[in-house]
Image (cartoon, rainbow, N blue to C red):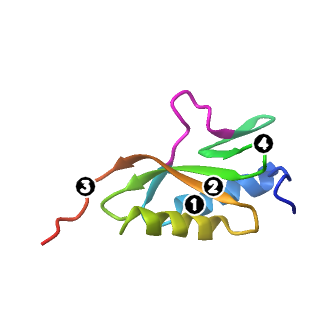
Amino acid sequence: MTAADPIEYPQAAPLAERVLAVDGVADLHPGTFGEVALLYPGHRVPGLRLDRSGRLEVHVVADLARATDLRSLSEDVRGAVGGDRPVDVVVADATGTPPATA
């Protein structure tokens, strides 16, 4: 697979499930008007987008009650995606209350 290769639906759906399983990810974010999605005949995978160079954008909603910090969350998301494709993680929204610090 090269960076410019498309992601087929049989790979995209499980990839989204792996990202959703990351501790600290509340959801995938589809963008304001649903513009962040991989589109397939009869299916769409919101929260994932390929740019023209083949970089994968992963737009997430962070759960601040579970995420230790956003940098670690981004690294965990990149690890869940795997592969050799460049990945940009966008924290598009957040939910939850961060734990109180002493």
User: Looking at the image, is mark 4 or mark 2 earlier in the sequence?
Assistant: 2
Measuring from the top left, give residue 91's x and y in whole percent. 47, 50
In the picture, measured across the screen, residue 86 lies left or right of residue 64, that is right
User: Tag 4's secondary structure?
Assistant: loop
The residue at the point 72 percent across, 44 percent down is 51
Kindly check if marks 2 and 3 are in contact, taking CB atoms under 8 A apart as contact.
no
The residue lying at 61 percent from left, 55 percent from top is 88
| Among the two numbered marks 4 and 3 on one chain, the one whose residue lies closer to the N terminus | 4
Q: Main secondary structure of the magenta part?
A: loop
Q: Which amino acid does label 3 sit on?
A: Thr
- The residue that label 4 is drawn on is 52
On residue 97, the disc is: 3
Please, is residue 97 above or below residue 93 in the view? Answer: below
Q: In which quarter of the image is residue 93?
A: top left
What is the spatial separation of the Cα atoms under label 1 and label 3, in whole angstroms?
21 Å
Give the mark nearer the N terminus: 2 vs 3.
Answer: 2
Q: What secondary structure is marked by label 3?
A: loop
